[in-house]
Amino acid sequence: MIIDTHSHLNFKAYDNDRDEVIKRTQKEGVVCIDVGTKYETSKRAVELAEKNENIYAAIGMHPIHIKTDLLKLKMDEDEGAFAPLGEEFDKTKYLELAKSKKVVAIGEIGLDYYYKPKTTAKLEQFKQKQKQVFIQQLELAQELNLPVIIHCRMAFKDLYEILKTKKLTGVIHCFTGNLEEAQQFMDLGFYLGINGIIFKLDLDEVIKKALLEKLLVETDCPYLTPPAEGKEKRNEPIFVKHIIQKIADLKGITFDEVALATTQNAQKLFGL
Ligand SMILES: [Zn+2]
């Protein structure tokens, strides 16, 4: 068994052939955690998990969906027919979703300073709002005794400052930091989520030096397709094998060793 710890089969990108994709995933022995990004996608993740044995759900609100008028962003057609930056975090709605036994994490939640408002004052406000909603969701995870799946872009310093004050465990999904940052998060008890970004950015040093006991594999599908599957192609959970192979190559160990260890790590973290 292999566990894709971060997939988005709940997204619109799979509306035409979701059942076939899930069938392929099951056939190849891949279990996945389907990750929500706002209330609608979290709800859909729970529905998919309830219907399919090999799917678990994570629920939460991605920073890109936190309601603000400080900047404008385009809709992501692959995700769904809704504009970003439009949701007020409503804890009661997420608590309701969390009643499902298939909910194994709160995520994806975090900080994203990639898109920013034009003035420094607005940027500061934007960051404050993100931090505030992030902390509310960390507290939700603590209340429910669940791990967190964290999205972080250009915000590792602020992320670390917040996480070190909380007693929590989880994964820094799509990790793109340097070795020092990797070490800081691992020291806090967090795992690093490794996905197809490793074919775009150079994370070789981090992967070589990080303990195998601290790594999780993921696809972040429909995004970040490994180049071996073709650049234009939509990503899907079974392609997680390319991530495992690259980690194995970098560490000089076998595919099976990486598969076994990362599966055990995911089982331990998410209680699967
Ligand atoms: Zn994601």
Image (tube, rainbow, N blue to C red):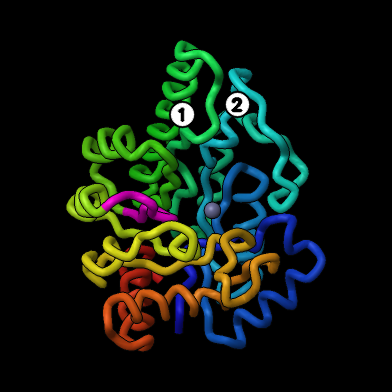
Q: Quadrant of residue 142?
A: top left
Q: Secondary structure at mark 1?
A: helix
Q: Residue furthest right?
A: 16
Q: Quadrant of residue 217?
A: bottom left
Q: Which residue is labeled 2 in the image?
A: 67
Crowd around label 1: few <14 · some 14–19 · many ≥20 (10 Å): many
What residue is drawn where x is 62% and y is 76%? 229
- Up the image or down, 58 lies above or below 213; here it is above
Mark 2: which amino acid? Lys
What residue is drawn where x is 67% and y is 45%? 40
In the drawing, does residue 185 fall left or right of residue 66? left
In the image, the residue with mark 2 has its CB under 8 Å from the nearest atom of ligand 1:
no
For residue 85: magenta? no
Residue 67 location, x and y as percent?
A: 60, 26
Residue 26 location, x and y as percent?
A: 60, 82
In the drawing, does residue 191 fall left or right of residue 195? left
Q: Quadrant of the C terminus?
A: bottom left
Mark 1: which amino acid? Gln
What residue is drawn where x is 63% and y is 73%? 52
Label 1 vs label 2: CA separation? Answer: 9 Å
Q: Secondary structure at mark 2?
A: loop
Residue 93 location, x and y as percent?
A: 58, 39
In terms of sequence position, does the residue under pointer 1 or pointer 2 come before the other? 2
Magenta extent: 170-178
Q: Which residue is labeled 1 in the image?
A: 130
